[in-house]
Amino acid sequence: MRIAVVGGGVMGGTLVTAMVRAGHEDVVVVERSAERRAELERDGHATAEDVSAIAGADVVLLVVKPQDVATVLPEVAAAVQSHATVVSLAAGVRTATIEAALPESVAVVRAMPNTPAVIGRGMFGVSPGASVPADRLDVVVDLLASGGEVVVVDESRQDAVTAVSGSGPAYLFHLAEHMIAAGVEGGLDPEAARTLTVQTLVGASELLAGSDDPPEELRRRVTSPNGTTHAAISAFDAHGVGEGIRAGVRAAIARSAELG
């Protein structure tokens, strides 16, 4: 199977590395920047400057900025094969927009990644377009799984995917910022506060991922009546932290819809 990646930035390079690591050898990256092409080539990846290099590809991944899609699509349409599947990772761009610009026989899939894909722990929300055969969707899911987990959702839910997982890493980093700062305020040196915070978040995340219990139950097990955790959770509730998180996700959903 021949794969072409249009856009060799951080996410494009991440996906190429993950796919090659998973055993996909026939991969080419289309990248305008000569400097970035040189970096990719030093990592052992085949590159090209012109979008015409996607000719013959079975799967074409568009890993470009949303504002660049309109410029790239005519070039993709001129070179893409009739049997190909085009996967767009451009945030907010609807499959209908891409389908309208490409030959009718080309299947279109939309995907929302997140940054932990850089370490192979990403999350991808995938939505098939109007006419994507099941076998082609399976191929896309398999490819993206090289960089993490994949869930298939109706495209009408992509704004929620964007808000929960696309933006989600920033929420965790924001929490880490404040945990570290509070630790320093409590007398810890910054390095110790960071180590304690990071490993706590990593360990708790792995515990949650490996458990069949809901997060509410895992939280309850840590929260002894009138203990330190109870004091912290009570303070969170008093300051509206939970509602603030939900409000933030709702705001991200609304903004994603506006951008789309």
Image (cartoon, rainbow, N blue to C red):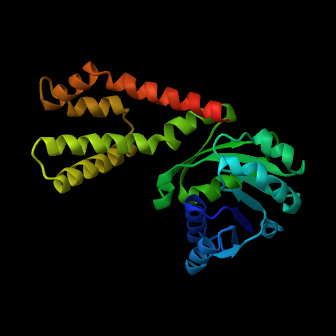
In the picture, which quadrant includes the N terminus? bottom right
Single out the residue that lies furthest toward the left: 187
Name the residue rendered at 65%, 74% in the picture: 34
Name the residue rendered at 46%, 60% in the picture: 119
Q: Quadrant of residue 11?
A: bottom right
In the picture, which quadrant includes the C terminus? top right
Residue 100 vertical position relative to residue 120 in the rendered view, above or below = above
Residue 144 place in picture, x, y as percent: 61, 56
Residue 31 place in picture, x, y as percent: 68, 67
Q: Nearer the viewer, residue 26 or 184?
A: 184
Name the residue rendered at 79%, 47% in the picture: 133
Residue 138 place in picture, x, y as percent: 69, 52
Q: Nearer the viewer, residue 53 or 140?
A: 53
Residue 46 vertical position relative to residue 111 in the rendered view, above or below = below
Residue 86 place in picture, x, y as percent: 76, 54
Let me know if residue 52 appears in the view: yes
Q: How many marks?
A: 0
Residue 189 vertical position relative to residue 213 in the rendered view, above or below = below
The answer to whether 79 appears left or right of 240 in the picture is right
Residue 43 vertical position relative to residue 15 in the rendered view, above or below = below
Name the residue rendered at 51%, 26% in the picture: 250
The answer to whether 43 appears left or right of 216 in the picture is right
Q: Quadrant of residue 27?
A: bottom right
The answer to whether 236 appears left or right of 28 in the picture is left
Let me know if residue 157 appears in the view: no
Q: Nearer the viewer, residue 96 or 214?
A: 96
